[in-house]
Image (cartoon, rainbow, N blue to C red):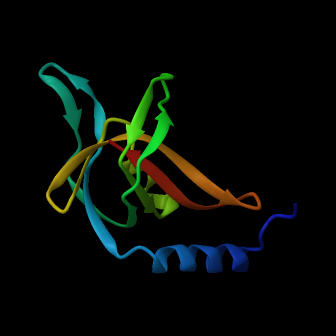
Amino acid sequence: MSPLSPNQVSEAVFVIEKMMGNTVSVETYTGDGAFGPAYAAAVNVTCGINMTHRLVQTANGEERVSIMVILARSEDAGYFTPESKVTYNGRASKVLETSLKTFKGSVVYAEAECS
């Protein structure tokens, strides 16, 4: 399997970004503080949304059901850390797991599973 050329990566990213017609508000989980979970200020992220149920294994080995999959630019993956709050159409969810999706060795987009 040969890696993609920079031009092919740009084209793949362009195709993925054309599918991203939604916006979510994300409050990135930053850890636990004296008063419970702490979050960064909310940011709006342009993404694609897939409302589907999937069984997901979290980083700590727990099996959970994901009800929403967010497809975002790979540069935005850092917003979607586990336990981050995501709001879409007034509905709040939490990120279960985030992964970078590659094609022929090149990162194309990020996928966040939410409960």
Task: State which quadrant residue 71 falls in.
Answer: bottom left
- The residue nearer to you, when weighing 42 against 102, is 102
Residue occupying image coordinates x 49% and y 54%? 111
- The residue nearer to you, when weighing 62 against 26, is 62
Quadrant including the N terminus: bottom right
Residue 74 x %, y %: 51, 59
The answer to whether residue 48 is above or below residue 30 is below
- The residue nearer to you, when weighing 42 against 15, is 15
Extreme residue in the front direction: 53
Residue occupying image coordinates x 11% and y 22%? 35
Residue 76 x %, y %: 43, 58
The answer to whether residue 16 is above or below residue 102 is below
Residue 8 x %, y %: 71, 77
Extreme residue in the right direction: 1
The answer to whether residue 76 is above or below residue 80 is below
Left or right side of 10 for 70? left
Residue occupying image coordinates x 21% and y 32%? 38
Label count reads 0
Left or right side of 13 for 18? left
Residue 83 x %, y %: 32, 35
Residue occupying image coordinates x 71% and y 80%? 7
Quadrant including the C terminus: top left
Task: State which quadrant residue 33 falls in.
Answer: top left
Left or right side of 95 for 90? left
